[in-house]
Image (cartoon, helix red, strand yellow):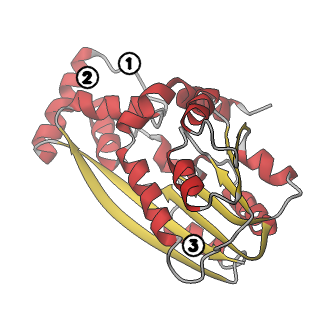
Amino acid sequence: MLDSRKQTIQHRFSRAAETYDANAEVQKELGLRLFQELAKGSGPEGIGQILELGCGTGHFTSLLAERYPEASITSLDFAEGMVRQARKRLEGKGNVSILCEDGERFLASCPDAFTLICANSTLQWFGDLEGAMRQIGRLLSEQGLFLGALFGPRTFTELAQGLSQIFGQEVYLPPDGFPAGEQLEDMLGGIFSRYSLQEELGAKSYPTLLDLLNHIRKTGTGGGQLPGALTRGRLQQLEAWFQATHGGYPATYQTFVIRGEK
């Protein structure tokens, strides 16, 4: 049984499954970034077993299936709506198994070994990331490779600042609980014999405040506890704050790309 926090996240992503692909530009870019990492250095060519954590609608899964048609790919996501979309996308790919499973629970109980473990835009939602990373290290075969991309705590800083301003108190959004680079550095050194951690900081600008808020809602990445209702009046105040402070509606995305070798 998932705890209440994970149930909330699970529900949000399942509800956003049908609108996710049309709005998840940053997540798709990160998936392509991870795919590029496969071509660097000592890659696991000719591999037999791949594990993908948090497959979402299966965009990155399809890239893996094309690159490794002979591999056995196990992809999982804990949101039923996402799993349904992924199964539609990967229909006919006999080497791909898509499971509706919680990633942390799966890692802790899995007895198998994998040559390649991937996780795109999912690790930041884990309750015990260090514990999960240790399990990933345990499940990697000799010469195995881990590739992961996740969002950092500076994501959506503009929105958090604007909400804090209009509510007159500190407002915390989900990224406030995401791991920072220092935390990731501390845990990676004790798990992998070789690793790299690359931080990237970028921003996207949205035409209107509604476009920004819809993007968050339609990708399932929203949430947070607001101190009051986001009424029409407060939305107008938030819009005015964005215009006065930024001259538009930007959203910062802080991302980390991890490459770890057994």
Q: CA distance from mark 3 to mark 2?
A: 43 Å
- State which quarter of the image contains the C terminus: bottom right
- Residue 228: x and y, percent? 40, 21
Disc number for residue 234: 2
Quick one: quadrant of the N terminus?
A: top right
* In the displayed structure image, the side of residue 140 where residue 261 appears, left or right: left
Q: Nearer the viewer, mark 3 or mark 1?
A: 3
Give the x, y percent position of residue 28.
42, 50
Q: Nearer the viewer, mark 3 or mark 2?
A: 3
| Vertical comparison of 113 with 168: above or below | below
Q: Amino acid at mark 1?
A: Ala
- Foreground residue among 65 and 106: 65
Question: Where's residue 48, x and y in %?
Answer: 75, 64
Q: Residues within 10 Å of mark 3 (few under 14, many from 20)?
A: many
Mark 3 sits on what residue?
259
Q: Are marks 2 and 1 in contact (CB under 8 Å)?
A: yes
User: Where is mark 1, residue-wise?
Assistant: 229
The residue under the point 30% across, 16% down is 231
Q: Which mark is residue 239?
A: none
The first of marks 2 and 1 along the sequence is: 1
Q: Earlier in the sequence, mark 3 or mark 2?
A: 2
**Residue visible at 73% across and 57% down?**
132
